[in-house]
Amino acid sequence: MTQTIAPRVRTLVLLLLAAACALLAGAGPASAHAALTGSDPREGAVVDKAPAQVSLTFSESVSMDDDSLRVLDPKGKRVDDGKPSGTGGTTYSVKLHAGLPDGTYTVTYQVVSADSHPVSGAYTFSVGAPSETSVTVSGQGAGGGFVGGLYGVGRYVSYAGFAVLVGGAAFVLACWPRGSGVRVVQRFVVSGWLSLTAATLLLLLLRGSYTGSGKVADVFDLGLLGEVLQTKAGAALVSRLLLLAAAALFIAVLFGAYDKRKDEEKRDLTFGLAVGGSVVAVGLAATWAMSEHASVGLQAGLAMPVDVVHLIAVATWLGGLTALLVALYRGPADTPVPGLAVSRFSRVAFSSVIALVVTGTYQSWRQLGSWTAFTDTRYGQLLLVKIGLVAVLVGVAYFSRRWTAQLAAATPVAGASAARRAEKGAGKASTKAGTKASSKTSGNASTKASGHPSANASTKAASKASGNAGTEASGNAKVAEKASGTAKGTGGSPRAAQLARQRAAVDAARQKRQRDADPNRFGLRRSVLAEAGIAVVLLVVTTVLTQTEPGRTEEEAKAAGTSSVGNSAPATGAVTLDMPFDTGSQNGKGVVRVELDPARVGANDLHLYVERPDGTAFDIPEVKVALTQKAKNIGPLPVAPDHITTGHWSASGVQIPMAGDWEVAVTVRTSDIDQVTISKNTQIG
């Protein structure tokens, strides 16, 4: 039966690893958790005059340094003063140099959001008219590269280590106290502690480079490490290391003194370990809750304790499940996991699932905000995958509970049958030995008593002979025991010691075959293996979720982007273009101002104003407007505005068929022979 199990186990493990690797490969760099929701000038805007400053507004508070916000001219040269100033933690601005020429300018930013994730991006705006630029804005991203990938691996390992440490310890303490003396269980829990500790140290070293330059050399910059220690994420990682020191003491007591105590002393020590372990587990979970999603946004004061409960429930369920799997497959044959321990874990897992459902529902509402976010955002899509995995896991757990119930019911019956078999075997051996001794002593007594006149002599002889036989048998047993002990010791022959080891190996193999032959235990092992495999993929998806921008934030960013893209600098949504003209005549100088509202695809209102150089309005014989999009070979589309009042012309219902970069050309005639055509480009969405 063991040969039949092995190929299935290997196949299932390989499939689960492949699924986990596919998820890891598709995770990519961490997505932005603070989204850019507004800017001034807006993305793609064409402004008449260079602004005095550029300001950015984010969906949540961010932190910046002097190099976080840059404004570059068309040649890639910085034109900002490099000292961003913040307002309330969500809006930052940087002043620009005076007298900037016309052209397209690029704004780049790289900040750290309040939930500890790096956020970066870039956009352009134009002064006067768009121009060619040597600045490339594609590929702008924080948290990528080799350092970003290594940081992501550290996050996966830290979550897995936390689940193994907390779940394994809880399984031993609450479900199988005798497991504290089982070597494979000890190694399993200690491996969780080592993984979490190593991953935390790695994250602490990588943090500065991960949120900054992304260079490997910066990992060893002590000055950068000092700056990290002053941040919220750095403080959380240091706190986690201190709590892991307390966890090391907990493990030492659990796997050292605890197993050696008597039952009365164990009860008192169990209570102390449960209280101390719970405090350490809550503290470790809080290091994530206080530095990531739960610490910012809606109802942060409630979200953080809910997140702590959610993390502990995940660790208790998945980590305990893996500990049970290790004990079932790798545990010693003479110390099998009893049915009572499996039943206890079944109840603990059921309680963890209830906690997961309650806390997960609240977290989903908080992070999504709408039903459409389930399908329209990456966070919602990953959450649907997680919900599906949990549903499958609960279904598999149902079958595990059935095997658990059968195993618990079969254990007492098997124990009673074994006791009866042992008692029956002992009785047969005693009867056989008694019969043999009686026959032997009876014959001796008859021989010695032949011719003796008294029957009592025969009885006494029989009794004496029987006693001698018993004494001899006892002596032989002691001699055999002594000989066996001598053979096992240093004074015995090597051949006897080898035989003793072979007998022990045969006995262990026989016990293992008997244990594996139990259909209830075999079914439980198979279902628990399936649970553990699904749990691995679920843990991967959960870790990816912590690195993904929440659906609520993503939808807010989309809404803000929709309202801003294609609009120019004025908050009204109208495009305003000032174009000086000079026809060469005596009164041929002035300024034409064109206003297009709302500067969108479809119908627009056009207003045209003509002013002298001193700002006074005046009339001219004729003014015409034409719109052209050269990139698509559209136009020129003529517009004939109506004269409204002195220096004011207007046209309504001006149709713009397509978004893009449009040329607005105005022909001004100041006399019968003096006229000029002037133009400017603007972005119309």
Image (cartoon, rainbow, N blue to C red):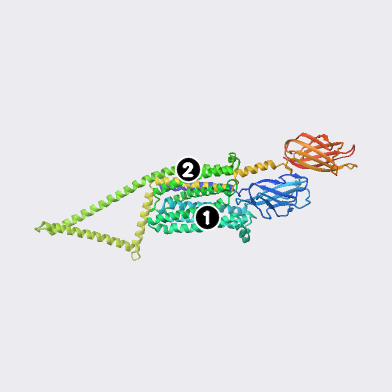
Residue 566 falls left or right of residue 453: right
- Of residue 331 and residue 286, the one placed in the foreground of this image is 286
For disc 2, the marked residue is 394
Q: What residue is rendered at 44% in x and 58% in y? A: 253
Vertical arrangement, residue 445 with respect to residue 400, above or below: below
The single residue placed furthest to the bottom in the displayed view is 491
Query: Residue 156: percent from the left, percent from the top?
Result: 55, 51
The answer to whether 156 is drawn above or below residue 579 in the figure is below
**In the figure, is residue 175 to the left or right of 123?**
left
Q: Which residue is mark 1?
A: 196
Looking at the picture, how far across and down is residue 494, in whole percent?
35, 63
Name the amino acid type tagged 1: Leu
* Amino acid type of the residue tagged 2 in the rendering: Val
List x then y, in percent, for residue 634.
Answer: 76, 37
Q: Earlier in the sequence, mark 1 or mark 2?
A: 1
- Are there few (<14), some (14-19), or many (20+) residues within 10 Å of tag 2? some
